[in-house]
């Protein structure tokens, strides 16, 4: 496993605290243009301004809606819009730890880039106002290349400009759809900036920029081992069973019960069971069975995938699935599974599975030929 040497960041809500910046600017505009003439409560304007600017729409439409909603004089439209274009960056705020994190990564020799959706001058003004432009070897805006995330092409432009390869690159962003999913599909590592740590798709999740350098180091060190086992010591699954049960899952209880009863030992033709270990401790499992619902023996079924929450940030689920898929290709034409977990749905689609809408027994499938 080659070490990560390149980090590509999103801008808004990843490096730049967009919400606080919008509030700052709305407060300023309300005062500058004496909008109290039309809006008695300043907070109403700030709230609506922030709400509209979190939507994906041209800034012209933002002000058209604000003027219509608050009955602001229409002759203020151009002045308000020009003021935003020329001065918004002056009210931008970065997240805590921004400079410390970028300085740390730079001192360690990482190549840094930004891939951001937005007008080129507008995004670059924000980057300059934050005082971080000099940290980056490359900045790609959708406005300059006329391609928007999540299109793979905008990430590939950044990789080319940075002379980087996807397997040695990590993408840091706040959006599953625009940042994490396309980066995963291109084979890059991912760090989701979020308070919600429930997703199993990103390789790491954090909401504190200061944690990112250490997270990247952790991603670069392959401490875990994926092993195909012919005999499963179920007593070593106790921690996984307890943790999965506490999360509301019952499938590992079934795994242990079926294995000990001999009803499913993953030992028939075309079956296999894989474990992920760290320093000898089992931290993840996944099995491959013949599909009992298939009319012919041409489909395999993914069974009992689970990774401990404490190590769910390091791509172990993906590597377990890679092992299952590689094994399945030796025996089956198709691999199927069933899940009702929304996070699992996103994960499986990110690794190539499609949704199956017309089956009572399956929710996802992937063709293996």
Image (spheres, rainbow, N blue to C red):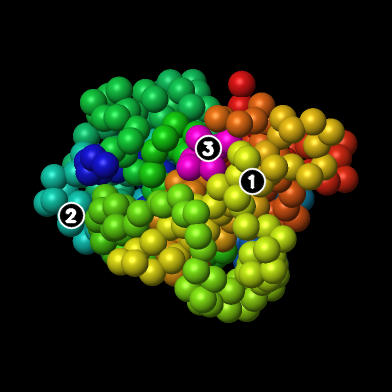
Q: What's the distance in space between the residues labelled 1 and 2, CA to CA? A: 54 Å
> Within 10 Å of the Cα at label 2, are there few (<14), some (14-19), or many (20+) other Cα atoms?
some
The C terminus lies in which quarter of the figure?
top right
Give the label, 1 or 3, closer to the camera.
1
User: In x, y percent, where is residue 190?
Assistant: 41, 47
Query: Residue drawn 60% across and 61% down?
Result: 46
The answer to if 187 sits in the magenta stretch is: no
User: Magenta part of the protein: which range?
Assistant: 322-328
The residue wearing badge 3 is 327
Q: Earlier in the sequence, mark 1 or mark 2?
A: 2
SS of the residue under disc 1: loop
Tag on residue 268?
1
**Which secondary structure is most common in the magenta stretch?**
helix
Q: Earlier in the sequence, mark 3 or mark 2?
A: 2
User: In x, y percent, where is residue 95?
Assistant: 37, 61
> Within 10 Å of the Cα at label 1, are there few (<14), some (14-19), or many (20+) other Cα atoms?
few
Where, by quadrant of the figure, is residue 296 drawn? Answer: top right
Q: Is 282 positioned to the left or the right of 59 in the image?
A: left
The residue wearing badge 2 is 103
Query: Residue drawn 58% across and 78% down?
Result: 242
Q: Is residue 30 above or below residue 7?
A: below
Q: What's the distance in space between the residues labelled 1 and 3, CA to CA? A: 13 Å
Tag on residue 149?
none
């Amino acid at each position: 496993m080659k070490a990560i040497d390149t980090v590509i960041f999103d801008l808004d809500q990843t490096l730049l605290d967009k919400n606080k910046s919008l509030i700052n600017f709305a407060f300023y505009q309300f005062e500058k243009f004496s909008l109290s003439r039309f809006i008695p409560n300043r907070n109403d304007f700030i709230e609506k301004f922030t709400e509209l600017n979190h939507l994906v729409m041209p800034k012209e439409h933002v002000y058209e809606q604000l003027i219509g909603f608050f009955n602001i004089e229409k002759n203020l439209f151009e002045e308000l819009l020009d003021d935003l274009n020329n001065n918004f960056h002056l009210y931008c705020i970065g997240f805590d730890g921004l400079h410390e994190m970028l300085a740390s990564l730079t001192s360690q020799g990482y190549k840094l880039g930004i891939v951001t959706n937005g007008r080129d001058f507008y995004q670059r003004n924000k980057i300059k106002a934050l005082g971080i432009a000099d940290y980056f070897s490359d900045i790609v805006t959708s406005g300059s290349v006329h391609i928007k995330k999540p299109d793979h092409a905008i990430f590939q432009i950044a990789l080319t400009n940075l002379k980087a390869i996807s397997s040695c690159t990590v993408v840091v962003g706040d959006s599953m759809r625009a940042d994490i999913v396309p980066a995963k599909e291109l084979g890059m590592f991912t760090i989701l900036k979020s308070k919600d740590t429930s997703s199993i798709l990103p390789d790491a999740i954090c909401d504190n920029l200061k944690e990112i350098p250490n997270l990247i180091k952790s991603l670069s060190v392959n401490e875990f081992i994926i092993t195909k086992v012919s005999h499963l010591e179920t007593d070593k699954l106790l921690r996984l069973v307890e943790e999965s049960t506490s999360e509301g899952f019952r499938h590992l209880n079934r795994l242990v019960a079926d294995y000990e009863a001999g009803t499913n030992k993953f030992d028939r033709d075309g079956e296999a069971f894989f474990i992920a270990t760290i320093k000898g401790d089992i931290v993840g499992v996944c099995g491959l069975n013949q599909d009992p619902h298939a009319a012919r023996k041409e489909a395999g079924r993914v069974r009992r995938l689970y990774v401990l929450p404490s190590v769910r940030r390091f791509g172990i689920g993906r590597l377990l699935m890679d092992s299952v898929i590689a094994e399945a290709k030796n025996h089956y034409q198709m691999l199927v599974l069933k899940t009702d977990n929304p996070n699992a749905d996103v994960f499986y689609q990110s690794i190539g599975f499609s949704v199956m809408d017309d089956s009572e027994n399956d929710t996802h499938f992937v063709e293996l030929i």
